[in-house]
Image (cartoon, rainbow, N blue to C red):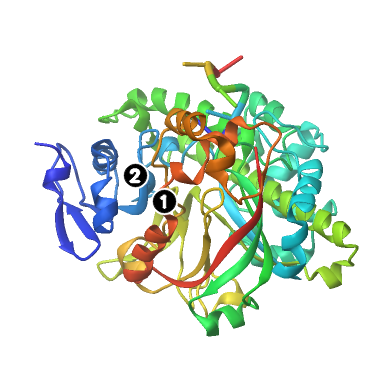
Amino acid sequence: MGLKEQLVQVQPFVYKLPENTIQGQKVPVYFYLSDRLFEILEEDAIRQAANAATLPGVKKAIYVMPDVHVGYGFPVGGVMATDPEEGIISPGSVGYDINCGVRLIATNLTADMVYPVRRELMNEILKNVPAGVGSTGKIKLTKSQMEEVAVKGARWAVEQGFGFLEDLEHIESGGALPNADPSKVSKEAYERGSDELGTVGSGNHFVEVQVVDEIYDEDIAERLGLKLGQVCIMVHSGSRGFGHQVCVDYLKVAKDALKKYNIDIPDMQLACMPFNSPEGQAYFSAMNSAANYAFANRQILGFLTADTIRRFFGLSWKDLGYRLIYDLAHNIAKLEKHKIDGKVLKLVVHRKGATRAFPPFNPEVPPAYRELGQPVLIPGDVGRYSFLLVGQDRSMEISFGTACHGAGRLMSRSKAKEFVRREGLEKVLGDLVVVARGKGTVAEEIPQAYKDVSEVVRVVDSLGIAKLVLRLKPLGTLKG
DNA sequence: ATGTTC
């Protein structure tokens, strides 16, 4: 019998795979899905989540978000918490793109100013913001500069003139995770990362000029300083080749650690090491270094885009009204405190294609948002809506303080390209303004290749994980 | 995601 047939719907939007469904499964797995999203849930994604539930030191449950799809070892959309003393850390359960994440910047511009000139504006952004696989930026870093980026994160970029000190107060973990140790990062990673800082990358990464298009919670939107028709910038990118290489390097370390520490796992892609071991600590230190590189990357990308818009309209920074709303990680493992059976425990929370969504009054929510809850930024795919939500209390009870991260793929890349060949790119994109150096990525990333992101956010909103505040619509998109 | 099958 397939695992999907063994899922039990325990309440609306909640499907449970009981513990011990597969051999060695220590905790249950919960899937948060609408009826429609349940229909397209892949058997392999269920298998991957169940496999993770067998890992040493896994606590309470594995949670899977509505934008789930099959990943490397652990599904995208998966959340796993392990005990830092007895449990493991798993590079595959963070993912190849360490601290892939999203940043939202508000401006004073309105849609009626931008809409008529959006094509020209996007072409300016295309000129100034490097994008695409293997793209390199204007910034070339020495190894010692790279080490500084790995420790300081977004602060390094601000010190170089890419942004403002107050930006740092509006970034998850202040834009610099502690526990970064640049000496645990390989020479290869430094080489790959040295000329990629301030570049968008490829795949579903983008820089988008958006407009606030619909507001669901007037009060919270107002307190965030966002109103209908307001133009924003959204950046979706990660740690580029630097983080990729860190993942590659430590998957090898993890495979060797399995023998050394006698860890038995159902899938080699879940290779892992005890968190409290030299190997586990080295990966954690290198992963945090890559995460800090990603914070610096989005800091630079957001600033370059804002500066391009500012110059395009001939405005001062003050008149542009640049204001960082928030920046967060989608792919990361963090040491956090969570309550299980009334006891507060320190846990290693792996989020892979999943967003932290801490509720109001959580001490880790920046003071500016302490009473509202942490902003949760959910990018859509090309041309589709993006959403802003705020974290709610229930997230701490049912998902280790975690929400979804985006739409999730529906069509494979090759299917999407075939679809574009058959229909023609112009027809597929319609009115959307999409600029890119090459058209290959655009064909792979058409809206039709993704699940409907609004369906995904409705699930986390309905469950009380995060509350819908507003929707953003793209005016123009820069792709890799 | 990724010097896109290093």
Q: Position of residue A379 (x, y in %)?
A: 53, 55
Q: Which residue is mark 1?
A: A348
Residue under the point 34% across and 44% down: A87
Give the mark nearer the N terminus: 1 vs 2.
Answer: 2
Foreground of the two, A57 or A309:
A309
Q: Position of residue A368 (x, y in %)?
A: 62, 76
Which amino acid does the dot numbered 2 rest on? Gly
Foreground of the two, A230 or A246:
A230
Q: Work out whether A252 lies above or below A43.
A: above
Residue A310 image-quadrant placement:
bottom right
Q: Which residue is mark 2?
A: A87
Side of A46 where A201 appears, left or right: right
Mark 2 surroundings: few (<14), some (14-19) or many (≥20) residues within 10 A? many
Q: Is residue A415 visible?
A: yes
Residue under the point 79% across and 39% down: A145
Q: Furthest-left residue in view?
A: A1
Quadrant in the picture for the C terminus of chain A: top right
Q: Position of residue A316 (x, y in %)?
A: 89, 67
Side of A322 where B4 appears, left or right: left
Q: Tell me the subunit letter for badge 2.
A: A
